[in-house]
Amino acid sequence: MRLLGFELGKVWGRRSFLLSVCVLLAVNGFLLWYTNLPDGEEPGLYAYRAFGEEIAGMTEEEKGQYVTEYKETMEGVRFVEEVTMLRGMSGEMGEALAAQMLEASPGMFEAWYDTYQSGGYLRFTDSLWQEERLARELYDEWQRCAEYGEYLQAVQENRTALKGIGIFGGTAGDSFSARNVEKSARDYQRLTGEGIRWMPGKAVTSSLENRWTDLFLLLSVAFFVGYLILEEKEKRLFYITRCARKGILPDVWARLGALFLHCLAAAGLFYGENLAFYGRAAGLGDLSARLQSLAAYRESCLEISVRQFILLSVATKGLALFGFGVVIAAACLLSSGFFLPYIVGGLWYGGSYALYAAIPAGSKGAAFKYLNLAGSLQTQKLYGAYLNLNLFGRPMSRLALTLGLLGLIILTGVSLCLLLFARGERLELVRGRFLWTLPFRPHGNAFLHEGTKVMATNRAAVLLLLFGALIGYRDLSRQYSLSAQEQYYQDIMLALEGELTQEKEELVLAEEARYREAFREIQRIEELVAAGEIGERVGEDMKSPWYAVTAFYPAFSRVWQQYEDIHENGGAFLYDTGYLYLFGIRGGEFRVDLLLLTGGMILAFGDVMAMEDRKGAWNLLGATLRGRRRIMADKAIVCAVAAALFSLVPFLCRMINIQGAFPLRGLSFSATAIPCFRKLPAWLPAGGLVMITALWQSLVAVAAALVVLLLSYWRKDSLQAYFFGVAVLLVPQVLGLLGLSFADWLSLYPLYRWTAGA
């Protein structure tokens, strides 16, 4: 036991290994936050938490009534939205389609119009689309759990309903399909529909079904094995440890035991982070409820609670990691090169992931899809789903086969480790050189040489490219949805675009007269109701078509504002919604973009100055002809140019994406055509304002890069530069993102979003 503790502490006690694990945990936490940012379409995690708290004390019958009423409300509100949008379309086609919808669902428009107008349907989210998607998703989950008793009954009474569970079809009594149906009925026979307590399963499913977390776990195991074996081979310590008093095998057993404990601890640590994040954001619910209370795991044939399911899933992931680790350890013992074991591990996981992703579930090769490393890491599917694989015509449980495969991998890996360590033929690393490696040729130009050191040797280019790809993907994949009001505003503004003419003025005045008539009629009907000449119900029916007209008045008021400004000050009509998103007045994307830009520059430039202190090179560089200050200036120029180009990625990607939904027209028009920029000089075109905004954001990015360089020069240590960079540049932005507005003035955000407040 002392040897086991020594081997475990030898790795976990190293600062570099702990730092690497902390970095993986930080990146995992960042991706959890980043991939769950609200995008305008999907409901946020807070919505699931709020809904779970709303139904916490309800009975199952009350839950059903509540979620059914919630879904019906959103269907009614969406119906009113669609009818209103059709009525707002120009031409007779919109009116005809709206009439058809009203005829198909009589009374539905009147029943939900007041709810639509008041906005009271927004219970858990901020938009109609998010609310409707949430209601539909939760209703489907509740319905699956509510029908669990019927599902079990169908398994026993109508076994043909389970043919879809098998991978292959067949009608003969000795076929795989028939045997699969019989086995399925036996496996489900002991289950009943009692004790199901439905709750949203978003937190549990999202916590356990995370490919990135699995990848980080594999990396942590690879790092652990590298410290455990490769480092000692590099230092030739195995020649000593093999001669220990207790012999060879206790040493290797202690190493494997330490690896096993690390795999279990890492699985608990990383998935504990996932559960903590989603539990805080979306709410885990009642962990003592039966697993089938989560709709995603209704098909499980195990009588376990949600808590037991989580523990089994994480523990089995630990076993899968141990199997991966012992095979990598055997490769480390067999190899005399440093990178070969990692190449083996990468090819193993990459190949198994390709099989898992490429092979269809219903194909004849389904066994190869599931019985591999990637399939074994999907432990939530092992315990939360039901699947039998076809092995020689016999249905075999995927759970049993996967556990058997893990046992075989672990047994094989452990045996190879014992054998290879006992034989001891390759106890040190051979430092070879690839034949195709080109020799390093320093630049004769000092500026180019510093640029190569910063961007290539220091890997700043790689980090900037990775962060640039992440930012670009985020901005390009963001979906912009046009509401009925925005569609109306876009249509009329594109028709009016340009200088004011008599024809355009007549169009605006005709629309204004239509709204004035609608308001006048609504007021007249309200007066009739107040005088008692007609009933309130009749009055609401009479006002309904006029309400459909006035629903678009907020959008028309923006048109009218531009019309009045042009009449008073001159100018041209310009569709401005795209510019409002591009300049950050709408959308709120600048915060996240600046956060990612700053994080990328901290990692890319935090070591630029410190690398010379770490190698003691400043004393030598200070004696050169150019001197220390000129070299520092070269480094600063390289970083400034890279930061400026890097900052254009979110601006250009955002501009391209916005153009698809909100056309950016009239770049040659005066920027004063955009209502919120009326105070700017009339000679400045809208295109010029776009260029000034891009240039200004580049300058802010350059300022952030220079701050990072100053911190790197001041601390003379890359880790401290990273730490202070996060504290000075990132922490205030995160606090501002969390709603603490005072923190914005401690960050670069007010400068970055200058155009939003112009």
Image (spheres, helix red, strand yellow):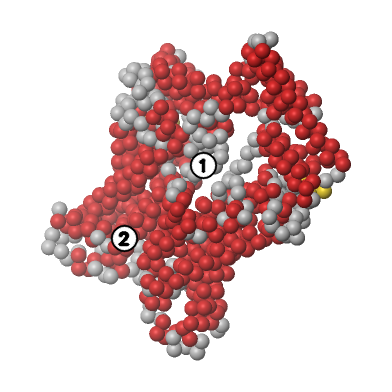
| Residue at left offset 31%, top offset 60% | 17
| Residue at left offset 43%, top offset 15% | 150
Q: Nearer the viewer, residue 412 or 50?
A: 50
Q: Quadrant of residue 232?
A: bottom left
Q: Quadrant of the C terminus?
A: bottom right
Measuring from the top left, give residue 645's x and y in whole percent.
Answer: 59, 64
Residue 302 visible from this viewpoint: no
Q: Is 527 left, or right, of 439 in this rendering?
A: right
Q: Quadrant of residue 188?
A: top left
Q: Nearer the viewer, residue 563 or 305?
A: 563
Q: Quadrant of residue 502?
A: top right
Residue 17: image tag: 2
Q: Residues within 10 Å of mark 2 (few under 14, many from 20)?
A: some
| Residue at left offset 47%, top offset 43% | 36
Which kind of residue does numbered mark 2 sit on? Phe
Could you tell me which secondary element the residue under label 1 belongs to? loop
Which kind of residue does numbered mark 1 sit on? Pro
Give the Cα distance between marks 2 and 1: 34 Å
- Find disc 1 in the rendering and name its residue: 38
Establish if 334 lies above or below 152. Answer: below
Establish if 541 lies above or below 205. Answer: above
Measuring from the top left, give residue 661's x and y in whole percent.
Answer: 67, 43
| Residue at left offset 56%, top offset 37% | 41
